[in-house]
Amino acid sequence: MSRFNAWGIFADSSPLMTDLKPQSDVVVSIDDVHKHYHLDDETIRAVDGVSASVARGEFLAVMGHSGSGKTTLMHLVGGLDLPDRGRIRVDGREINSMSDTERTLYRRRHLGIVFQAFNLLPTLSALENVMLPYLVDGRSSAESRARAKEVLEAVQLGHRLKHRPALMSGGEQQRVAIARALMVEPVLILADEPTGNLDPSSSKQIWDLLRSLCETAQTTVIMVTHEAGAAAHADRVLFLKSGRLSGEAQSEGAGDAQLVADRYAQLAN
């Protein structure tokens, strides 16, 4: 029997699958992290002394205008870049103390990353695109195919297995990208503006899918966004301004975009 329901994963006999969120179980710990860039004589403080923690099963949104440092922070958490100062731990492992090879393997086997631009290979079918993380990791074609079919069915794309990206809508392509991120049963999904290219209906489906993963599979999600409507579907919103945390809002997944927008406007002044 599949472990997945229509949008997520069944809370079956696995000890990691529960509807409860143990908020004391910190998955991501960011401790006084700095990342600066130098452009001619100017120092750009992309991330400037950020500290935060994210619990297992929490859906966290990081919101800020362009240039606020939100994408840089996500890259640091994912080990795609290294901080100049400070520490980042994910599921108990210190990301910035790993070698380049260790970080690559850790991302491949434990993290799921979803981008705004989908990043699907146009010549491959949905099934083949989703198989890639297993194939790159040396898994057999049969094992990769079976797992990819399972996760595509989980995101309601079992009828699109043989379709190439050009034959799918933007929302379907993003669900393929999320299915690909789910291949390794990640402890953490990093989503960078995942609905930036989608219409409102497709965007709502993606937000609901991410919430389902948190609630039923205890997957932790960090979503970077500039949209109040997107952030309102998270449990909590952190606001970044000029590389620093300016405050937060407890959105609790209620979808109250006005609440988030008002708090954002208040902190922007």
Image (cartoon, helix red, strand yellow):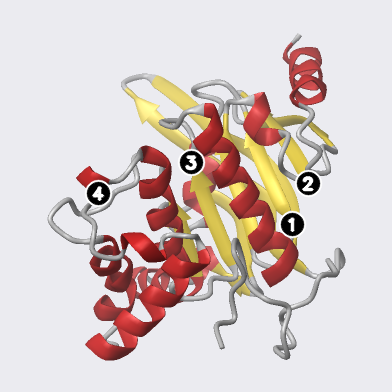
Mark 1 → mark 2, Cα distance in angstroms: 7 Å
- The x and y percentages for residue 29 are 70, 59
Query: Quick check: marks 1 and 2 in contact, CB under 8 Å?
Result: yes
For label 4, the residue is 165
- Give the residue furthest to the left: 123
Whichever of callouts 4 and 3 sits on the residue coming sooner in the sequence is 4
For label 3, the residue is 194
Does dot 2 land on a helix, a strand or a loop? loop
For label 2, the residue is 235
Mark 3 → mark 1, Cα distance in angstroms: 17 Å
* Quarter location, residue 91: bottom right
Whichever of callouts 3 and 1 sits on the residue coming sooner in the sequence is 1
- The x and y percentages for residue 122 are 17, 50
Mark 1 → mark 4, Cα distance in angstroms: 30 Å
* Quarter location, residue 233: top right
Question: In terms of depth relative to the viewer, which is nearer, 124 or 86?
Answer: 124
Report whether 183 appears left or right of 92: left
